[in-house]
Amino acid sequence: MKLWSGRFKENTSELMDRFNSSLKVDAKLYREDIEGSLIHSEMLKNIGLLTNCEFEQIQEGLKAILLSIEKGEVVFKEEDEDIHMAIERLLSESIGVAGKKLHTARSRNDQVAFDLRLYLKKEISVTRDLIHDLMEVLYERALEETGTIMPGYTHMQRAQPIRLSFYLLAYFEMLKRDYKRLGNAYEIMDELPLGAGALAGTSYATDREFLRERAGFERIMANAMDAVSDRDYLIESASALSIGMMHLSRLSEEIITYSTREFGFFEVSEAFSTGSSIMPQKKNPDAAELIRGKTASVYGRLLSLLVMMKGLPLAYNKDMQEDKKQIFEAVDDYQNALLVMTGMMASMTFNRENMLRATKEGFLNATDLADHLVKKGMPFREAHEVVGRLVAYGDSRGCPLEELDRAVFEELIPGVGDEIFEVLKITNCVESKKSQGSTNHEEVNKMLKAAKEWLEEIK
């Protein structure tokens, strides 16, 4: 018999029971649900709605159910519908009448809102720790590679030479924003919905401040109707997860590209590669490809939440039962992607010679030549034109700028001196950058110092 069957004269169909049940998904919330019930029952005792004996029975019963679930001894029934009713049924079967009093002054509407917020607060904390771990690996690898020079790209065309450490620290900064973004989501969701009832509050003199303090929430949700119908925190979290996945996907794309024979900059370790069922020579960067692919799935979870909520009237609607699958899978995908990316980056081989060799082709020193001419008094647009003509001349002959005859330079730049060949050296191009946040050695060292301090601060 269903716990809400009093109003019904007929049984629901088995088809409806299967269609209506969310237990296969929301059983994941059993810890949070029991934690909320332990706190709720204590509040009921405090305000005189449970005797001490009933309270002790409920507490012991709930703890026993938790232990049984952890041991895999509990078999849920489809007619339970969801984890909330499943646990209440198990409790009533175990301790009798006292178990039937647990739901006093509570609805499944505020119960599930509590469970989800508590779950997500925990998972955000776990996720931020995983982001920290990946940032630590990026920092360590950047520290090792301060002397490694590689091409920097725009439009996937070689643009200017940079330090590999500079490149890695760019992703460090993205992850720092991801860490902060999840922290912002946590701060906003840190409000207690429990005690709101179905939508209008409750006629019992409940102590929501006690619930807030015991459950570890920062604030109490001010409006009961909003408390049970709000899913902004899921959408905001899914948005933060999506942005985080986008960053991992961008890095994955570059790992895939840079590990090809055509580039040969990176080599993914065998621990994070797979082979082919037909081609014996293949070593595929499948870890990076899967992260790139799963990014689309996480985006889909965000979109599903947005579309689900866009037309719902206040307050709770059964459509919202679909929210849990979306956020659970988004969290799992992002956490797994972070773990894999951390392992992949920690074991990555950087082919320094190939990266340096690539900077010698494609005229990556052209901008530095233009800047040098500007410093000698030539207007920038004129310098741009002159260097462009030198590039065209060198390109037509397969000759880099630094190997052109001095006579070629003198034809376009009267009075040019031998210093121009020093300017064109790739290492000097990297070191010539003076602006804050640039790729020169001093600025990269400042970035590394700031990164180390930040990692220690958030430990």
Image (tube, rainbow, N blue to C red):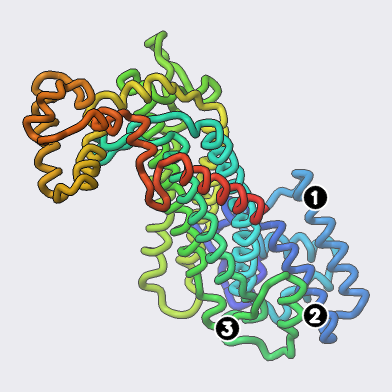
Which residue does the numbered mark 3 point to in the structure image? 224
The answer to whether any part of residue 26 appears in the image is: yes
| Relative side of 11 to 214, left or right | left
The residue where tag 2 is placed is 44
Label 1, on which residue? 68
Quadrant housing residue 211: bottom right
* Amino acid beneath label 2: Leu
Q: Residue at x 59, y 85 (%)?
A: 222
Q: Secondary structure at mark 3?
A: helix
Position of the N terminus, as image quadrant, is: bottom right
Residue type at the position of mark 1: Ser
Of tags 3 and 2, the one toward the viewer is 3
Q: Image height check: is 172 above or below 3?
A: above
- Mark 1–mark 3 Cα distance, whole angstroms, equals 34 Å
- Badge 3 or badge 2: first in the primary sequence: 2
| Label whose residue precedes the other's in the sequence (1 or 3) | 1
Q: CA distance from mark 3 to mark 2?
A: 19 Å
**Pointer 3 local density, CA inside 10 Å: few below 14, some 14–19, many at least 20:** many
Residue 70 pos. (x, y %)? 76, 47
For disc 2, the neighbor class at 10 Å (few under 14, some 14 to 19, many from 20) is many
